[in-house]
Amino acid sequence: MPKIAEILGFLEEISPLALQEPWDNSGLLVGSGGEEVNSIYVALEATLKLVESLPPHSLLITHHPLLFKPLKALLWEEYPANILRALIQKNLSLIALHTNFDQTHLGRYVASEVLGFSGVEMEGYVGYFPLKMSTHELASHLKRALGLERIATVGQERYLERGAIITGSGGSLAPSIKADALLTGDIKYHDAMIAKSLGINLFDIGHYESERFFGEILASVLKKQGYEAIIVDSKNPFHYS
């Protein structure tokens, strides 16, 4: 049975923690490097239902860190203490790979393998690629590739030469984007207005929808190293009616 430190060492090789943003909290969040694990699970994030379903002495690797902001109290009926309590009671370990994994794997994978764009070049966690299509054509393509019923867009109909993608939430970075169009999620109203004034077309591809591939990417990478990881589905918290 592998130890947490061994798995952490491999993860550090493929996606160095030093790449994470200063505000991020990737790395070992619950557990000890000396602990042995019986099984490895990968998911977009830790939920109480998911944690309660895992067998004891397992490792859960998530994209979103469970511990993100400083805690002033641990109240068992509140988030995230309710999940932390379940993790500790079952002797489960938790690792997060967030903005470092965006840069090394997630952005490129979504742009090339999911959306089918070639010539993807990563600059930090922004992926750039040639487009050569109209805004209407791009919107239709994104809906098909991501299984979206509808997509919110910002900007006028025009021909697009170069695209950019930031998985998760990246609308606030629109002013620094060196492209005609930005594909990202969680686009806020004021960020949309800024992008519109700068002549940058925005396409809201959803936070969950653009990051839900984390499990399959990491499980594949781990398998090549000899680690068998089980993908557990983190459901989209939003329902549309």
Image: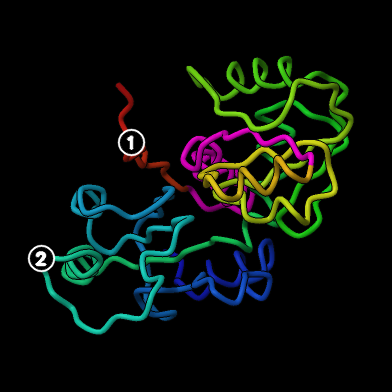
Q: Nearer the viewer, residue 216 or 2?
A: 216
Q: Is residue 117 left or right of residue 225?
A: right
Residue that mark 2 sits on: 77
Q: Is residue 188 left or right of residue 197?
A: left
Q: Nearer the viewer, residue 214 or 5?
A: 214
Circle 2: residue type: Glu
For mark 1, give the secondary structure: loop
Circle 1: residue type: Phe
* Mark 1 crowdedness (10 Å alpha carbons): few <14, some 14-19, many ≥20: few
Q: Nearer the viewer, residue 203 or 39?
A: 203
Residue that mark 1 sits on: 238
**Quadrant showing the N terminus:** bottom left
For mark 2, give the secondary structure: loop
From the top left corner, tell me how far across and down residue 169 is, in percent.
Answer: 55, 50
User: Magenta residues, as a range?
Assistant: 199-228
> From what the image shows, is residue 121 above or below residue 115?
below
Q: Is residue 120 left or right of residue 36?
A: right
**Quadrant showing the C terminus:** top left
